[in-house]
Image (tube, helix red, strand yellow):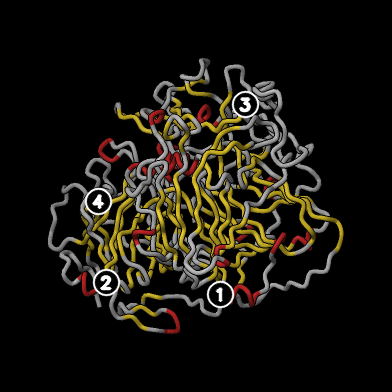
Amino acid sequence: MSTTENDTPPVGSQQYENLAHTGSAPPIDVIDVPGRGEERRSSERDRGEPHGAALPGVDSGLGLRKFVDRLTQPPIIRAWRRFGEQPIRIRAEEAVVRLHAGLPRTRVWTYEGCMPAPTIEVRSGREVRIDWENGLADRRGPLHLPFDVVRVPPNAGVTDFVRALQPGGRSNARGGGDDAYPPLANTQDITAATVVHMHGALTDGHNDGWAHNVALPGNVTRCAYPNAQSARTLWYHDHAMAVTRFNVHAGLAGFYLIRDEVEDALDLPRGDEELVLAVADRNLETDEKGRFTGRILYKQAGTVQNGIEGEIPVTGPFTMVNGTIWPTKNVDARWHRLRLLNASNSRVMRFALHDTTDGHGQAPLPSNDPAFTATRIADALVVIGTDGGFLGKPSPPADGVLEMGPGERADVLVDFGALRGRTVELRNENNTVLNARPGQSEASAMQFVVDRRQVRDPFRLPRVLDARYARWTHRSDGVLEVDGGRLVDHHEHAWIGVVPPRVRGAAHPEMWELQEVEGDVPADTPDVIRIATQDGGVTTLRPVAKLFDDTVTLRFGEGDWAVWNIVHLGGPEHPMHIHMTDFQMLTRRQWPLTNGNVPRFDMTLGATPTPLPVPSAGRPIDAITAGRKDTWVVKPGEWVSILGELAGATGSFMYHCHILDHEDHTMMRPFVVLPKPLLAFHAGHGGGHH
């Protein structure tokens, strides 16, 4: 169903700006200036190749050729082979890499000199201890960011999306020209302070990567990961307070794979047929002559309204897979397992495989054009797992398109045996353009070239993946029905309000922690959210916290079940991530939208003076969305309810939007899980019901 009145909002409208936060804005028609789309010479004579001899590739309209570099896999650390309690030491350090054969080398931040970082493999139930060392310093002291952060000013008061998305440009501290931009205030002073979050891990709070607990260069933080979880794809990345967006963009991220006996019994593709794919978008710096320098450029579109300046979260026209722009991979004609991660700062991806054996021309082709979708292989992707492990059974995504927000993972099988001798592309169909021109985002992510030879492949797609999987339900009598039909007659509730940008002039969207209010509240009271209920009543909610450092209000007993209600009142879509445990989505409801917001939300009051109506049914919860997860894309006007058991760990944790610019600004909050005997002595616990 459509959740907006106008699927193609005009450029310059608030709706268009909202879509741009996740790279979801419709592409703008740009003038194809002669020479702008041709391959640009680099500013370094000896370009070399990152991974062997460069391949011929195919043209793009963005100054680099596609598919000239081989896809690489990060090295593997099999941590489960370590003896006893011997820790692993993993060092954050600067490295020199080449992002594309047509680019000079550049400095990035890495773990152990790799981008992405080494893949850590562990066994379920075997604890691993890791010493995270911050080695991001040289003889002069802590390192500064390996790229510049620039803000593209509005053009005559209108956000300049085209210039922000064009390849190239530079900080005006590095040179002049009409594509030189001012640095974002104070970013040139940022130095390396790091803390690692194991995204999706069940571990105590002091191991979780609390954003304030940064380590300076030369310091080491030891963390313990019990791995008391089923087989799944996790990832580790930096989580430093207020600068997560910069540290992750610099390269501080890697895979962490838990394996168990259920996975072993499935006999899934392994070895060369199991690929980790970290997909992320980037922009690149150019010098004053328009030549690529090899450096990443963190380039944001600036906004201004009523004199208040802000920025659109960063997106880029180039897509990297495992640290290489538009790589290619030769594969045998057999089943392969793809461990997909959307490692972008902001961009929501809609992945699909396309058959490009017969070519695709050179003219720009938007992803919503029937000629674009005609090459999609609708049955190519088979999802077997999500953030929290295996689904109950294999599930192809609808129409062959798999949507993934930043931070989400998907475990996917592809039968390349059915595509023997074909050339296929992994593309992002979320308002991208094939053969994009400067000011547009390229649809291509990477290429697979399938061998012509027939091979014997004993793998058969299993009918059942994980018999332990069960769908959780919240019955009308308030009782939860969970694994094995077990009934839970008491649970807690958390209410989270997602608020659009521009409320009372604020530049950025906000996230409010809400609590129910008893009694009548005057209709003109600011910051009050009213929702009509099925029985004719009204649920009245009011924020008790808005910023990370506000008082902690969400406290749970270890072992509690909790329903989190995320009410999205308008603005950009948000990939919401909750630390500490797995959840399942219970319901997804929908209000209609006007100009991107729920119609009864008053932007001046930041309230709904008239209660929102009872919402209608929202997007269906398919088998993939119903999997065990820790991150979900919540779209404007949706009320999403998710259920999780807060068991197996204690301490202080975080939840936030995984658009890293949003997380670093106003969309992250803490919650606490304590043993119930301790919690009984802690004021403020409550909110559950029978």
Q: CA distance from mark 2 to mark 3?
A: 55 Å
Q: Mark 2 sits on what residue?
A: 675
Q: Earlier in the sequence, mark 4 or mark 2?
A: 4
Looking at the image, residue 254 lies above or below residue 20: below
Q: Earlier in the sequence, mark 4 or mark 1?
A: 1
**Image coords of residue 300 (percent x, y):** 46, 32
The part of the image, by quadrant, that contains residue 46 is top right
Q: CA distance from mark 4 to mark 3?
A: 50 Å
Decide if residue 686 is on the left or right side of residue 217: left
Q: Residues within 10 Å of mark 4 (few under 14, many from 20)?
A: many
Q: Earlier in the sequence, mark 4 or mark 3?
A: 3
Q: Mark 4 sits on what residue?
A: 608
Whether label 4 touches label 1, CB < 8 Å: no
Q: Mark 3 sits on what residue?
A: 292
For badge 2, the amino acid type reads Pro
Whether label 2 touches label 1, CB < 8 Å: no
Asked which secondary structure carries label 1, the reply is strand
